[in-house]
Image: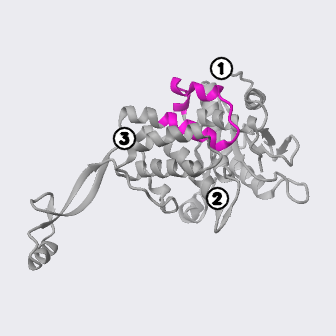
């Protein structure tokens, strides 16, 4: 488990900046220079700046299904319920219609996140005052139960793509603050390991995309290297092999699997077999011609309990590496380690 030291908190900002490129814009420059004592004070500042920018563009609206008693026809008339009204001597039509509204799931998430931050003691009073001013723009937005948000159903498209960073940030905040409370018990708010792992993976991917234009950087599926008859009959029973990151340059490829665990080694001080089997399987199925040009790397976020790790093994003609990346060092050190990986495997320099 990583402790939330000042350097780590600052690095969370840098990782967010790469993962969500919007943070690299000018209105977020002050965040980089500010000192933060805890993760939620940082998140509050980013959210405030993001919301101020979004409000200038206008809150996202989408069509919401409405069902109302009206004096005049609007949309589709529900005949059965309208007849019920007439029998009850109500001179109203029951209408079903769509209405373009700000009171949608995206804005509801923004509002409940602000509500939670206002209740969080680690957020500074000055930031809470700014959040209260922003809340005035959300007076017509419903307040939802954060535990009932169906994150997996959210879809981003052209009209709401500016919400992507904000909603992901809200998920980080909500997940962490909900984890910090139990029935009748208050615990120190944490940034969950699951969210750090997701951010860590996306950060590494976007870092290489930004700094290494000569590399092909993506996250493809690896196809199982099966004989024809098995491919036709048995493929549906096999799990998908989805890579975190794949770097390719000329004939060489490197598949990177990012990991974030409380402990990198097992109780017997050995690398965890499941992780090694996974990266080995990715590499061997990708290198269908057995050229040895495909390598694999398990990249662990370094924890307090582990020393720096950097091992490389030749496994049946392919190079499989295991190394750690210290997220509590200065960000220049993180960049140096990531650049070192590309230099070692491809001989390229950072742009």
Q: For the point 65% across and 25% down, which residue is it? A: 33
Please tell me how crowded label 2 is: few (under 14), some (14-19), or many (20+) other residues with Cα within 10 Å.
some
Residue 295: percent from left, percent from top = 74, 40
**Residue 217 visible in this rendered orientation of the protein:** no
Magenta-colored stretch includes residue 26: yes
- Residue identifier under label 3: 59
| 177 with respect to 141 (left or right) | right
Q: Is residue 146 left or right of residue 96?
A: right
* Residue at disc 1, secondary structure: loop
Q: Residue 142 location, x and y as percent?
A: 38, 55
Q: CA distance from mark 1 to mark 2?
A: 40 Å
The magenta stretch spans which residues?
21-50
Crowdedness near tag 3: few (<14), some (14–19) or many (≥20) residues, C-alpha within 10 Å: some
Separation (CA) of disc 1 from disc 3 = 37 Å
Instruction: Specify whether 5 is left or right of 240.
Output: right
Quadrant for the C terminus, please: top right
According to the picture, the residue beneath numbered tag 1 turns out to be: 351
Question: Which secondary structure type mostly characterizes the magenta part of the structure?
Answer: helix
- Kindly check if marks 1 and 2 are in contact, taking CB atoms under 8 A apart as contact: no
- What residue sits 50% from the left and 51% below the top? 115
- Provide the residue designation for mark 2: 179
The quadrant holding residue 267 is bottom right
Mark 1 burial class by Cα count in 10 Å: few <14, some 14-19, many 20+: few
Q: Earlier in the sequence, mark 3 or mark 2?
A: 3
Residue 175 shows in the view: yes
Q: Nearer the viewer, mark 1 or mark 2?
A: 2
């Amino acid at each position: 488990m990583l402790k939330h030291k000042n350097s780590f908190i600052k690095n969370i900002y840098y990782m967010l900046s790469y993962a969500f490129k919007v943070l690299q814009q000018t209105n977020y420059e002050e965040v980089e220079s500010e000192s933060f004592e805890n993760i939620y004070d940082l998140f509050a500042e980013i959210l405030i700046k993001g919301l101020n920018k979004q409000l200038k563009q206008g809150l996202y609206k989408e069509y919401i299904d409405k069902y109302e008693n009206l004096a005049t026809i609007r949309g589709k008339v529900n005949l059965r319920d309208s007849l019920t009204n007439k029998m009850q001597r109500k001179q109203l039509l029951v209408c079903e219609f769509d209405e373009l509204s700000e009171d949608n799931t995206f804005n509801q998430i923004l509002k409940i996140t602000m509500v939670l931050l206002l209740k969080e003691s680690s957020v500074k009073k000055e930031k809470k005052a700014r959040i209260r001013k922003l809340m005035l723009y959300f007076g017509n937005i419903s307040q939802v139960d954060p535990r009932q948000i169906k994150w997996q159903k959210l879809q981003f498209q052209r009209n709401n793509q500016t919400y992507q960073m904000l909603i992901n940030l809200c998920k980080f905040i909500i997940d962490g603050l909900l984890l910090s409370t139990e029935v009748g018990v208050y615990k120190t708010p944490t940034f969950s390991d699951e969210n750090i792992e997701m951010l860590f993976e996306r950060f590494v991917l976007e870092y290489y995309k930004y700094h290494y234009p000569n590399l092909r950087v993506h996250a493809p599926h690896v196809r199982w290297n099966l004989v024809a008859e098995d491919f036709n009959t048995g493929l549906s029973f096999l799990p998908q092999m989805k890579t975190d990151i794949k770097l390719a340059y000329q004939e060489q490829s490197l598949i990177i699997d990012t990991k974030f665990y409380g402990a990198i080694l097992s109780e017997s001080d050995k690398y965890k077999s499941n992780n090694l089997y996974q990266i080995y399987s990715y590499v061997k199925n990708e290198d269908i011609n057995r050229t040895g040009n495909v390598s694999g790397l398990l990249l662990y976020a370094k924890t307090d309990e582990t020393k720096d790790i950097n091992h490389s093994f030749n496994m049946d003609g392919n190079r499989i590496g295991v190394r750690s990346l210290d997220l509590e060092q200065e960000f220049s050190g993180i960049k140096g380690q990531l650049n070192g990986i590309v230099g070692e495997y491809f001989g390229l320099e950072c742009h």
